[in-house]
Image (cartoon, coloured by chain):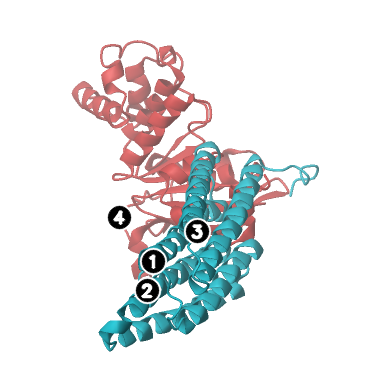
Chain colours: A cyan, B red
Amino acid sequence: MVEGCKNLVRLMDIGLEKLKNIIVEMGEYSAKTVFLAIDSYLNDQDLMEQLYISAQEIRKMQEEINELAVEMIARYQPVASDLRFLKSCIEIGYGFSRFGRYAFDIAQVLRIFGKLTSCNKESVDNAGKHVKDMIKTSIEAFIEKNIEKAKKVKEMDTYIDKIYLNSLKKAAQMKENQIKCIVSEVLILRYLERIADHATYIADSTIYIVTGEKIPKYTL
Amino acid sequence: MGREIISLSSRVRKEDETDHIYKIKTENLNAWFGTKQALKDINIKIRKNAITAIIGPSGCGKSTLIRCLNRMHELVPSAKVSGKVYIDGIDIYSKNVDPVIVRRKVGMVFQKPNPFPTMSIYDNVAAGLKLNGIRDRKKLDEIVKKSLEQAWLWDEVKNDLDKPGSSLSGGQQQRLCIARALAVEPEVLLLDEPTSALDPIAASKIEQLIVSLKKDYTIVIVTHNMQQAARVSDYTAFLYLGRLIEYDETAKIFSNPKEELTENYIAGRFG
């Protein structure tokens, strides 16, 4: 370190800090949106319009992240951990935008199927709690650059996959009069499963920022 | 005089089979200016037909390192070298190697374009050939044309070969210097900050030229410009305080360096 330069802030750091703040804000907002969608299903509350607006807001934030990241690449030609951070911000922004989209899809199920008061919602309740935890942990891992938390998210994903597959198997054996409950359940669990996958990708991005290790997304 | 002249490309040492992919190899290379040590135990293998960039802050030993690769360092009074530098398996500092032959095989281009000011464009390129005893006009014409073509300058100067080299623009002068270096058919080209005195357009042309040359030459480039190293090189070596801190594929160095010192330097956190 050159003496006298210790307090100098790199121009790029100002942009990186701004980008991090948008990601954190977007993460919290998209998490709230997913939580609201899960609760709306559990409580039979039709919030489609509200969730549509939230999903749109999240999309705008994603655009903002992409534009800022591209501008920073053009201005500062980042390398090493700066470059990995920018690449990951773009991927994380996409992940959060999918949270918004699936939250809206959950709301749509309720709108199309109508009241589902008589349905057993235990599986969705279980999966919902788990997905909420995954989202919170993936955001914390990013903020704290915490690899342990990021790895925990990956482990949690297996549980959601299992609930979804069990539900699918249950659907295959269902009688016709129970079809409405099971289709809505399978659909919502499918969306939750996708949300869980994106929370895992966000966690993978944190691992990439910290260690440079790339984790393949598409594994069977 | 009286030295046995050894062709640098004729032999590959048998004991290391993997050596054939490397053109240059140093072993515990140290260099001094008087009592000041400029290089400390440098061990590096430089690949054939690839571009290797040497980066690092001012005074880290970048230029000294490449000047040790063609025995130019020893031309400085009080300069000293220890350790080994092998080119094609031959130690270029061994007693029976003629430094003039080394410098012919390992050409060099400097930061500031330095064509011979009183010589014509043609004579600038032909100067090294004439020094080597080539007088046949037809042969000289052929090599001058080929060298200027390789340096992407022929189309711009073919009707002005009699004009002085100094009449060209900075970027053209630098390409003339590259043509001059290529004319004596070197195997290695050392470039010491070849674009730092040029405008961005001229610099970009030189960068494209350097990349086009690697199919025929082994190229080592010293640069202060990190983006230039990232754009043109296949391998990057980071030097700090005379030591080789990290050496790897350029893509790895610029996306995921292993050493924190490298990360801090290339990310502009010091230097």
The label nearer to you, 1 versus 4, is: 1
Looking at the rendered structure, the secondary structure element under dot 1 is: helix
Note whether B213 is above or below A40 in the view shown.
above
**Tags 2 and 1 touching, CB below 8 Å:** yes
Which residue bears the numbered disc 2? A184
The label nearer to you, 2 versus 4, is: 2
The answer to which of A165 and B87 lies nearer the viewer is A165
Q: Say whether disc 2 or disc 1 marks the residue closer to the N-terminus.
A: 1
Q: Chain of mark 3?
A: A
Q: Amino acid at mark 4?
A: Ser
B155 with respect to B227 (left or right): left
Looking at the rendered structure, the secondary structure element under dot 4 is: loop
Outermost bottom residue: A173
**Tags 1 and 4 touching, CB below 8 Å:** no
Q: Chain of mark 1?
A: A
Looking at the rendered structure, the secondary structure element under dot 3 is: helix
The label nearer to you, 3 versus 4, is: 3
Q: Position of residue B207 (x, y in %)?
A: 40, 35
Which residue bears the numbered disc 3? A96
